[in-house]
Image (tube, rainbow, N blue to C red):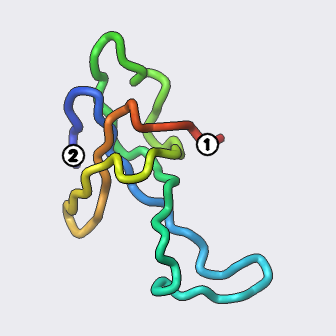
Amino acid sequence: MLKPLSDRVVLKAIEKESITKSGIYIPDSANKEKPYMYEVVAIWPGKKESNMDSIKIWDKVLCSQYAWDDVKIDWEEVKIIGIEYVLAIVE
């Protein structure tokens, strides 16, 4: 498992549904837009003045587009992002 340093968070993409509410199947090749909703899989306490205590593991969050670094570990792709680019927690 990754342990992010400083004020970073490790995120895993939440898969979008392939079937719409009306029952239409949308293949992955048609979905060119990457999801912005992620699940937090690892955090680090961070600096005293940071906002790290507001996010917990397994929270679903929205983040800024293109603000992350892609990392592939154990055949799983995750994103490492600074806490300042996490826009909201989805409840």
Image location (x, y in percent) of residue 10: 32, 45
Of badges 2 and 1, the one in the foreground is 1
Q: Report which quarter residue 72 is drawn in.
A: bottom left
Dot 2 alpha-carbon crowd within 10 angstroms: few under 14, some 14 to 19, many 20 or more: few
Q: Residue, x 21% and y 39% (percent of image)?
A: 3
Q: Can you say which quadrant of the picture contains the C terminus?
A: top right
The residue to which callout 2 is attached is: 2
Q: Residue, x 47% and y 45% (percent of image)?
A: 63
Q: Tags 2 and 1 in contact by the CB under 8 Å rule?
A: no
Left or right, residue 2 beside residue 32: left
In this view, the residue in front, 11 or 2, is: 11
Q: Which of marks 2 and 1 is nearer the N terminus?
A: 2
Left or right, residue 35 beside residue 25: left
**Label 2 residue SS:** loop
Q: Residue, x 28% and y 46% (percent of image)?
A: 80
Image location (x, y in percent) of residue 83: 37, 32
Q: What residue type is labelled 1?
A: Val
Image location (x, y in percent) of residue 6: 22, 27
Disc on res. 7: none
Dot 1 alpha-carbon crowd within 10 angstroms: few under 14, some 14 to 19, many 20 or more: few
In this view, the residue in front, 82 or 23, is: 82
Q: Which amino acid does label 2 sit on?
A: Leu
Q: Residue, x 51% and y 78% (percent of image)?
A: 31
**Label 1 residue SS:** strand
Look at the picture and state if 28 lies above or below 82. Answer: below
**Mark count:** 2
Left or right, residue 33 beside residue 80: right
Left or right, residue 67 beside residue 22: left
The residue to which callout 1 is attached is: 90
